[in-house]
Amino acid sequence: QVQLVESGGGLVQAGGSLRLSCAASGRTFSYALGWFRQAPGKEREFVASINMNDGSTNYADSVEGRFTISRDNAKNMLHLYLQMNSLKAEDTAVYYCAAGGSYSARTPREYDYWGQGTQVTVSS
């Protein structure tokens, strides 16, 4: 079992930055971790993922060069981060942290565990 809790969402102006965090507990060493987002009326889409073993990363084309995924272990708790820079109105969505079998996986059905989501709103 894996438990995921996101934080860090909020309202920001276009061009600004936000940093999302995800506290992960449980058997996280068995999984890759990633971020997805879902805008109103749209399907949930892949944002970024990271290989927990070697730190390899994978990004959606729409965020490549603007977002950075990272992770660290502190006080026996694994944290996943998403640094979001140069935000655009189209980045507005609920962002979800997810745990899956492979960091190369890009579809929601390939991920087994999900956080509750955190809202990011970018005003233009």
Image (spheres, rainbow, N blue to C red):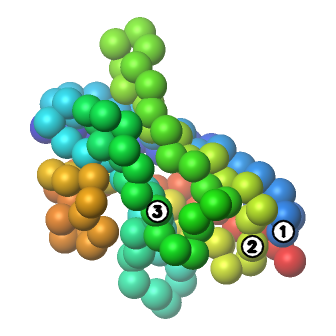
Number of residues whose C-alpha sits closer than 10 Å to that of mark 2, classed few (under 14), some (14–19) or many (20 or more): some
Q: Point out which mark residue 59 bears.
A: 3
Q: At label 1, which amino acid type do we have?
A: Ala
Q: Secondary structure at mark 3?
A: strand
Residue 103, position as x, y percentages in the image: 27, 53
Q: Are marks 2 and 1 in contact (CB under 8 Å)?
A: yes
Badge 2 is on which residue?
Answer: 88
Badge 1 is on which residue?
Answer: 14
Residue plotted at (63% across, 47% down)? 83
Number of residues whose C-alpha sits closer than 10 Å to that of mark 1, classed few (under 14), some (14–19) or many (20 or more): some
Residue plotted at (34% across, 13% down)? 76
Task: Give the mark, 2 or 1, whose residue is nearer the N terminus.
Answer: 1
Relative placement, left or right, of 16 versus 24 is right
Relative placement, left or right, of 32 versus 44 is left
Task: Give how far apart the Cα atoms at labels 2 and 3 are.
Answer: 17 Å
User: How many numbered markers are drawn?
Assistant: 3
Q: Residue furthest top?
A: 75
Residue plotted at (73% across, 55% down)? 85
Q: Of residues 65 and 27, which is closer to you in this image?
A: 65
Q: At label 3, which amino acid type do we have?
A: Tyr
Residue 73, position as x, y percentages in the image: 40, 20
Q: Are marks 2 and 3 in contact (CB under 8 Å)?
A: no
Residue 63, position as x, y percentages in the image: 58, 67
Write down the quadrant of residue 87 in the picture.
bottom right
